[in-house]
Every structure is written in C-alpha cells, then in structure tokens.
C-alpha cells in the first residue's frame, strides 16, 4: 500500500492507505465527497521526488469527471499530498 494525505474541502480529510496504482479520482472517492465550498477546478497535488524536490500540480477535477481531461487522472505515489482548496467568491 501507499500513504496519501488529503486535506482541505473534503468530508473526510487525513491519511489514506491506498493500493499501489490508485488514481487521483479513486483516492478522492474514498474521502466522502467534496464540501459545498470545494474548488474542484483547482485541486493541488504536492509530490516529493527521491531527491527531496517538491513539485505542485494543479488538477481540474471537473474536467476529468466530464471526460475532457482524462490524462490528468494520474496514479498516486507514496507520500503524495492532495489539497482541495476553498472556492473563491465568484468561482
């Protein structure tokens, strides 16, 4: 298994133990859904590589769910952090 950490505007944030090969969408399905204030077009995936370098990827969940951005449904790695930010006023 891998450990993935999920924070922000989701029903059940925290550490999740997931099977290797789990995708972002599958991981989000384990959280109990988004809150009413979730910015689903601006989800962040923070990943640290073997050298300790961190990268942050912005992911549009709505586009993936609609089928427009299937390639963004990436496989998660051990230690990944998924951040679901709060919506802005007119978002």
Image: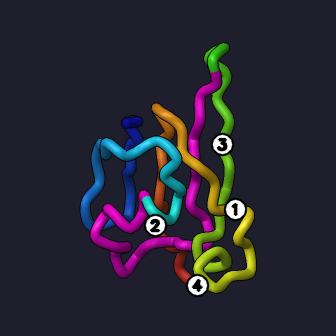
Disc 4 marks which residue? 90
Disc 1 from disc 3: Cα separation = 13 Å
- Contact (Cβ within 8 Å) of mark 4 with mark 1: no
Disc 3 marks which residue? 56
Q: 79 left or right of 66?
A: left
Q: 23 left or right of 3?
A: right
Upstream in sequence: badge 3 or badge 2: 3
Q: Nearer the viewer, mark 3 or mark 4?
A: 3
Disc 1 marks which residue? 72
Mark 3 residue crowding within 10 angstroms, few (<14) / some (14–19) / many (20+): few
Residue 86: image tag? 2
Mark 1 residue crowding within 10 angstroms, few (<14) / some (14–19) / many (20+): some
Upstream in sequence: badge 4 or badge 1: 1
Disc 1 from disc 2: Cα separation = 20 Å
Question: Does residue 57 sit above or below 38 in this rendering?
Answer: above
Q: Tell me the SS state at disc 1.
A: helix
- Contact (Cβ within 8 Å) of mark 3 with mark 4: no
74 and 31: which is toward the camera = 74
Which secondary structure class fits the magenta region best? loop
Seen at 52% across and 47% down, the residue is: 21
Residue 4: image tag? none
- Contact (Cβ within 8 Å) of mark 1 with mark 3: no
Percent coordinates x, y for residue 43 in the rendering: 56, 61
Q: Which residues are magenta?
A: 27-49
Upstream in sequence: badge 3 or badge 4: 3
Upstream in sequence: badge 1 or badge 3: 3
Q: 38 left or right of 72?
A: left
Upstream in sequence: badge 1 or badge 2: 1
């Amino acid at each position: 298994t891998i450990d993935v950490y999920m924070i922000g505007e989701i029903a059940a944030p925290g550490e999740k133990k997931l099977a290797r090969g789990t995708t972002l969408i599958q991981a989000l399905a384990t959280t109990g859904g988004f809150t009413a204030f979730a910015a689903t077009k601006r989800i962040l995936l923070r990943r640290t590589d073997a050298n300790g370098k961190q990268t942050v990827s912005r992911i549009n969940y709505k586009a993936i769910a609609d089928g427009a951005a299937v390639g963004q449904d990436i496989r998660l790695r051990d230690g990944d952090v998924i951040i679901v930010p709060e919506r802005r006023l007119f978002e």
